[in-house]
Image (tube, grey):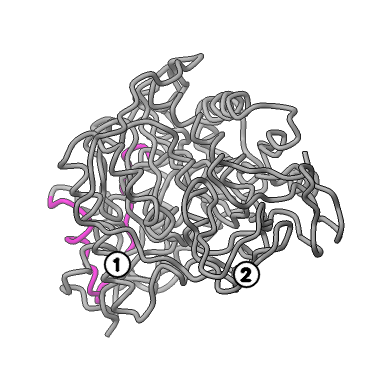
Amino acid sequence: MRIIQVDERDNVAIPTADLAPGTPMGGGLFARSYIPQGHKIAMADLREGSPVVRYGAVLGHLMQPVQAGGLISETMLRLPESPDLDGLEFGTDIVTDLPEPPVSVFEGYPVEGSPYGGTRNILGIMTTVQCVAGVLNSAVERMRKELLPLYPAVDDIVPLNHPYGCGVAIDAPDAKIPIRTLRNLLRNPNFGGELMVVGLGCEKLTVERLLEPGEISGENVIMLQDHRGYVTMTDALLEMAERKLKRLNERRRQPLPLSALCVGMQCGGSDAFSGITANPAAGYASDLLVSGGATVMFSEVTEVRDGVRQLAARCADAFVGRRLAEEMRWYDDYLRAGGVDRSANPTPGNKKGGLANIVEKAMGSIAKSGRSPVVEVLSPGERPSKRGLIYASTPAGDMVCGTCQLASGMTLQVFMTGRGTPYGLAAAPVIKVSSRSDLKDMWSDLIDVDAGVIVSGEASIREVGELLFREIVDTASGRKRPWAEKHRLHNDLCLFNPAPIT
């Protein structure tokens, strides 16, 4: 297969490998110039102003004519207007015949008061302000060396450092977003219900903003300004951590229904193959999970904005649909206030991989949500109240999205990539799925699942989706560890803070 046309309505296709000028592509079509892998080829003569169609969607309009077999690059396209958020039709495409999952349980850690079980057993230590990060990081080094070997049932000790807490407009309306994110992040099921907060003593983000009144005590909170010097501080941190570790060490995995599993879907370093291999396979795995009762979150506002009509049609009811439109509208206003629009999203790497603009990127991105009905829409960092497929509104930046999904209760993430990224999270395992087999060959010790076999015809979307589903269950159960977890590739937490910094 030399070229791939996604939809019969498309007037472009993409090559599966670089094409030299004159390369025949079937049907009398030949490459009129060098065309890189994944970039768009005109399937017919197109005039200036003609719509360019891929995934059955208009990516934009040509600013110059292109002959059949010619290359269409991002510089040739005029971006269409965003889909209107008024008059969306909700619930017109509700799919009920989802595939049945091959298993209905995983081996996880139950958490009292949480709808989700943990996939890992971690001591998470939250900071109230960046000022204390140096002391905490130093203490965690000692904890891992001196304490962790004594408690073999605990997987890790993770400092939850962040750049918030002081020098911020703490009472600004949008400050609720980073504060909510930190409050909920502290309660991620992978931390087993243990609360440990390290503050300084003079910051704006007081412990009262993170904890409930009954949780604020010397059992859960250490303020460094209350201690006489570095040695006393670190000794106090180790003493508190050991009490938490003793309790965490008593946790044991047990069979839990899939309804106790919360999985996040995300893509980064996407290319033109992401939307036809990795993301659809993840979408099939998502449908298997949802069919089995699990919760699956997908996010990244700018990467679904142009697919809002398709998502609105899948909203379970009008309330969910209105919430979707509300989150899209808030983000439109947020970008406008910053002097940009959704076109700021694609990266140089996305474009090098064949993605012309945000419309094309969005059409491929929403494929990772599968076909399930959308049962709930969350603001950034909110926790779900329902199980099923959830749209968790977040920015598209990988680290910000990952942090928000952790706050929303995600205990395992599936990450699709076409260009490649060593991204990873300390608080949850991350399974990497490549859109191309040559990326898997190049990064054999970073990519966990190769979806590029869909292009070569070695496997179908369904087969790769089923393989990914089993990888998710095995990873959630602790039977497998993804490469990022084995290598301890942990990116920093990155908060979404649209509020002013003073």
Q: Nearer the viewer, residue 26 or 335?
A: 26
Along the line of sight, the residue nearer the viewer: 403 or 305: 305
User: Mark 2: which secondary structure?
Assistant: loop
Say whether residue 110 is visible.
yes
Q: Residue at x 16, y 40 (%)?
A: 318
Q: Give the prevailing secondary structure in the magenta stretch.
A: loop
Tag 1: amino acid = Asp
Indicate whether residue 459 is drawn in magenta: no
Residue 22, percent from left and from top:
87, 57
**Camera sees residue 139:** no
Quadrant showing the C terminus:
bottom left
Residue name at image x 48 percent, y 59 percent: 399
Q: Position of residue 57 (x, y in %)?
A: 47, 51
Q: Nearer the viewer, residue 75 or 118?
A: 75
| Circle on res. 65 | 2
Q: Secondary structure at mark 1?
A: helix
Check if residue 212 falls in the magenta segment: yes
Q: Residues within 10 Å of mark 2 (few under 14, many from 20)?
A: some
Picture layout, residue 471 above or below residue 77? above
**The image quarter in which residue 258 lies:** top left
Magenta region? 191-213
| Residue 147 in picture, x, y percent from top left | 52, 45
Residue 191 image point, x, y percent: 39, 41
User: How many angstroms separate mark 1 from mark 2 (CA)?
Assistant: 32 Å
On residue 332, the disc is: 1
Is residue 288 placed above or below 14 in the rendered structure?
A: above
Name the kind of residue labelled 2 in the image. Answer: Pro
Q: Quadrant of the N terminus?
A: top right
